Amino acid sequence: MSKKFNITTLSNLARINLSAEEKSSLTGDLEKILDYVDKLDELDTSDIEPTSHVLNIENVYREDRVVNQRTADEVLKVLPGERKEGRFFQVPKVIEDAE
């Protein structure tokens, strides 16, 4: 892997402004990262099966079942009068007008 890169070009592509000190520090950090990647490239992974996750994860589904189903009329019977309008629930406003 080539370690040659232009930190100014990278910062322009990322649309960030870097001072000279930040460029110097970032250059050192990127070189360390690339050295680590080079070290990983030396590993023999020919016997390793490619995976999308490090753990063997399976989706566990359950059957959807309706339990304790109440009708709208049953619920409206116990709702205070000022909280219902016809067959509808009145709920407090939770989203303010965006301005």
Image (cartoon, rainbow, N blue to C red):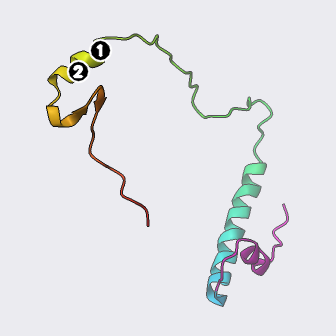
Question: SS class of the residue under badge 1?
Answer: loop
Q: Where residue 96 sits in the image (x, y, percent)? A: 36, 57
Mark 2: which secondary structure?
Answer: helix
User: At which x and y percent is residue 20?
Assistant: 66, 89
Looking at the image, residue 32 lies above or below residue 86: below
Question: Which residue is located at x 65 percent, y 83 percent?
Answer: 18
Tell me what residue is drawn at x 51 percent, y 18 percent. 60
Q: Which residues are magenta?
A: 1-18
Residue on which disc 2 sits: 75
Front-lying residue, 4 or 66? 66
Residue 80: percent from left, percent from top:
14, 31
Return the residue nearer the eye: 99 or 45.
99
**Tag 1: residue type?**
Thr
* Number of callouts: 2
**Rendering quarter of residue 73:** top left
Taking the image as shown, residue 63 lies to the left or right of residue 75, namely right
Q: Quadrant of residue 68?
A: top left
Give the Cα separation between the discs numbered 2 and 1. Answer: 7 Å
x 67%, y 34%: residue: 52
Crowding around mark 1 (Cα neighbors within 10 Å: few <14, some 14 to 19, many 20+) is few
**Which quadrant does the C terminus fall into?**
bottom left
Picture quarter with the N terminus: bottom right
Residue 71 circle label: 1
Q: What secondary structure do most residues of the magenta stretch adopt? A: loop
Q: Amino acid at mark 2?
A: Val
